[in-house]
Image (tube, rainbow, N blue to C red):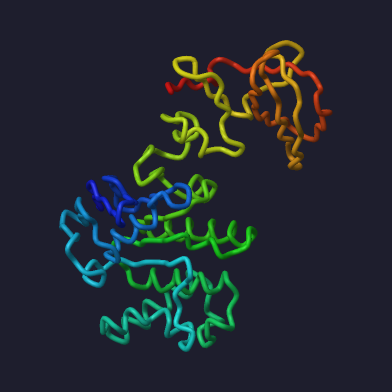
């Protein structure tokens, strides 16, 4: 449905986005994931028409929308800051775009009634944004995007201003809404948990370029680069060795056993369901080589305690540095 073909954006001498290409199918939830400054929000702005690409093209349903203004692209957008009008009531905020496009009043009422039921704002229509919680403000922003009935909805880190508990709840709500309505969504986030739990596919970015495009489970189990291996998963994948002998092993695949590679405990970080053990696996006389081990339950090993670690060969990942 959407085809992004080789778009780039440069500010001065800094290339923020470098020949980015990916597709979005109809009804698909695609996440643009990556660390701060990797170019994901700039990419979203170029798709929205808020930034102009220096090169490349953007097609929607086979039509080149690259030269079109944001209004002519007929896309919906949910901003990180909600972007609500503080002097307007919730109902007026939701309908603002429809009124600007002079949609008939009866059609506005019909769409409002359906979307209010979806997002649970029925008791708040006459309130102003200042009277709402962060989660309620986010629901208003979502309702405004849904009511537009656009072909594609763009979301720029919409949950980053919410606390952890509310973020988890809204994550579930957004995904459920997207699936129920069959919406096509591009969702920008730096949070791998959001991307992994919500997206059908993830576009992982690094320094303005695509690192890997794949379904969430493949990014975790079949990373193609060291960056992907260490960005996806918490704690990140351990990288051991170099050159042709560079291997990756996830902390949850390492066992503490009676036989195996010698290791010395550096520290333990108890998380409740498990303990993250930081261990040194360097041989005598070598520089320190640290790995992390996810140990189930509560296990407080003493610093400098000697252990042995092992893992199954099928859980190893080979990389070439």
Residue 110 is at least partly visible in this image = yes
Mark yes or no: residue 201 visible: no
Q: How many labels sit on residues?
A: 0
Q: Residue at x 33, y 72 (%)?
A: 148
Is residue 39 left or right of 197 when viewed as pictured? left
- What residue appears at the point 71 percent right and 14 percent down from the top-left corner? 262
Q: How far across and how far down the image is residue 46, in percent?
A: 29, 59
Q: Residue at x 65, y 27 (%)?
A: 290
Q: Position of residue 60 (x, y in %)?
A: 22, 57
**Residue 107 quadrant:** bottom left
Image position of 61 (left or right of 143): left
Toward the top, the furthest residue is: 259
From the viewer's perspective, tell me whether residue 265 is left or right of residue 150: right
Residue 200 to residue 313: above or below: below
Counting from the top left corner in percent of width and height, residue 214 is at 39, 38
- The quadrant of the rendering that contains the C terminus is top left
Q: Picture coordinates of residue 142 (x, y %)?
A: 45, 69
- Image point (47%, 52%), residue name: 36
Where 166 sits versus 228, above or below? below
Q: Quadrant of residue 201?
A: top left
Quarter occupied by residue 101: bottom left
Question: Image check: 17 left or right of 292?
Answer: left
């Amino acid at each position: 449905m959407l085809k992004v073909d080789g778009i780039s954006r440069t500010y001065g001498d800094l290339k923020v986005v470098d020949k980015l290409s990916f597709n979005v199918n109809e009804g698909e939830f695609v996440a643009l994931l990556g660390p701060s400054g990797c170019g994901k929000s700039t990419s979203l702005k170029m798709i929205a028409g808020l930034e102009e690409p220096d090169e490349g093209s953007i097609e929607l349903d086979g039509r080149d929308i690259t030269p079109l203004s944001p209004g002519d692209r007929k896309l919906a957008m949910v901003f990180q800051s909600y972007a609500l009008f503080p002097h307007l009531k919730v109902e007026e905020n939701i309908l603002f775009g429809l009124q600007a496009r002079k949609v008939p009043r009866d059609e506005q009422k019909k769409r409002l009634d359906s979307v209010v039921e979806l997002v649970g704002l029925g008791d708040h229509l006459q309130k102003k944004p200042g009277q709402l919680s962060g989660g309620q403000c986010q629901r208003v922003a979502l309702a405004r995007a849904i009511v537009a009935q656009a072909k594609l909805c763009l979301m720029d880190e919409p949950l980053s201003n919410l606390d952890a508990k509310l973020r988890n709840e809204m994550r579930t709500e957004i995904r459920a809404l997207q699936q129920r309505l069959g919406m096509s969504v591009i969702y920008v986030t730096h949070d791998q948990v959001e991307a992994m739990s919500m997206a059908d596919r993830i576009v992982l970015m690094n320094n303005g370029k695509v690192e890997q495009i794949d379904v969430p489970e493949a990014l975790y189990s079949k990373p193609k680069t060291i960056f992907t291996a260490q960005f996806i998963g918490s704690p990140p994948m351990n990288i051991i060795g170099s050159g042709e002998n560079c291997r990756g092993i996830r902390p949850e695949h390492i066992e503490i056993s009676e036989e195996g590679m010698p290791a010395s405990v550096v520290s333990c970080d108890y998380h409740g369901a498990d303990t993250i053990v930081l261990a040194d696996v360097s041989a005598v006389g070598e520089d320190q080589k640290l790995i992390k081990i996810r140990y189930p339950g509560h296990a407080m090993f003493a610093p400098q305690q000697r252990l042995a670690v092992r893992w199954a060969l099928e859980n190893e990942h080979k990389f070439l540095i």
